[in-house]
Amino acid sequence: MALFSTPPQSLCVLRLSAIGDVCNAIAAVQAIQSQWPDTDITWIAGKAEAALLTPLLPSVKVIAFDKKQGWKGMQAVWNALNGKRFDALLHMQSAIRASLLSVGIKAKYKLGFDKVRASDLQSWFTNTKVPSPTSLHVLDGFMAFTETLGLKAQTPSWTLPVSDADTQWAAGQLTDKPLLVVAPAASKAFKNWTAEGYAAVIEHALHKGFDVILAGGPGKIEIELGQAIERQLSRPVKNLIGKTSLLQLLALEKAAALVLAPDSGPAHLANAVNTPVIGLYAHHNPARTGPYNWRQYVVSVYEEAIKAETGKSVDEVSWRTRVKDENAMQRITIESVIARFDEVTEKEELL
């Protein structure tokens, strides 16, 4: 049953991390804004995520939570709220840290996942359970919050105002050839494909007439993988790993013809600006965490990795089961990714 028959005055969104999940949650927030434009929305997010959200959602009040400060960080958020009472809290993160933070957020209704999706004791901290949709995808779970509030069901979409400065910077990276952005690394190394694999696909893309740019964050994992890829290439490509802001990366992916990435933030950033994505998956079910509008282009070995590890099919294990084998991404073959690249470039008419 819908909680509101008329638009509420104020809502609070609690989704701290990670970049990919926050990108998905943006679609739910913008769905609220499209139907209830006068509802005041506050979003509590992690520091990096808040830096991304603030310019992208100018009509939303974004409050940054610094998890490194622990209890003091929570108190800082509560102080920033200044005792405000919301009509509803959308508790979109099943993590004990987020749940503890929710204690100091005043709201009549505290929406959380139902028993199908809730974990880490989240149910103890909410008073309204959001029915899980039949779809496994994280974003569909977020959209279910909007329907529980009382919004009409709608297809997720994103409107992200990339700044003129970032757009001009991205345009400066382009040539007259279509651009493939390769964001090779996730924050966790076990999610990453091999340097040899990426190099082979890049060589194929260059041969097909693409320009290629390596992109990603400033972490050691990202930088070292980028350098390993470069060493295996027969000709140089531009390496911007660790040299861009998230907003510049978003602008670059918006300008690109295609993005290649593992299960990571850059894959979801590309999805949010409607750039085709080839996602590489082994550890998580892409039906749950794949780039939402481009799941048909995922290269996944998740099913075979689950079978090898558990002896069971995907249908026989929990929907959130993660493959634990740290070498699972090596099951992805170079041939399968090149074949997908050729399929995407033909279907999307990228050349």
Image: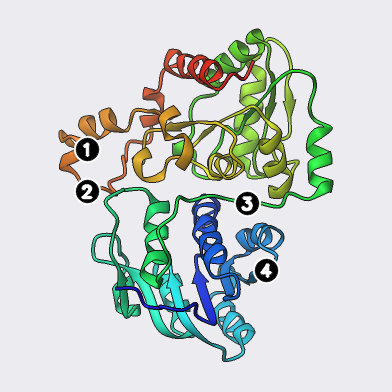
Which is more N-terminal, label 3 or label 2? 3
Viewer-nearest of discs 2 and 3: 3
Q: Are marks 2 and 3 in contact (CB under 8 Å)?
A: no
Which is more N-terminal, label 3 or label 1? 3
Which is more N-terminal, label 4 or label 1? 4
Q: Which residue is mark 3?
A: 159
Amino acid carrying mark 1 in the image: Val
Q: Nearer the viewer, residue 261 or 10?
A: 10
Q: Secondary structure at mark 1?
A: helix
Q: Which residue is mark 4?
A: 59
State left or right for residue 46 relative to residue 298.
right
Which is more N-terminal, label 4 or label 3? 4
CA separation in Å, label 1 and label 4: 41 Å
State left or right for residue 58 relative to residue 1.
right
Q: Secondary structure at mark 4?
A: loop
Q: Nearer the viewer, residue 335 or 2?
A: 2
Q: Are marks 1 and 2 in contact (CB under 8 Å)?
A: no
Q: Secondary structure at mark 2?
A: loop
CA separation in Å, label 1 and label 2: 8 Å
Check the image and report above or below for 164 versus 226. below
In the rendered image, residue 42, in percent from the top left (x then y), is placed at 58, 74
**Can see residue 105?**
no
Q: Which residue is mark 2?
A: 318
Amino acid carrying mark 4 in the image: Ser
For the C terminus, give its image quadrant. top right
Q: Tell me which residue sits at (75%, 25%) in the image.
A: 238
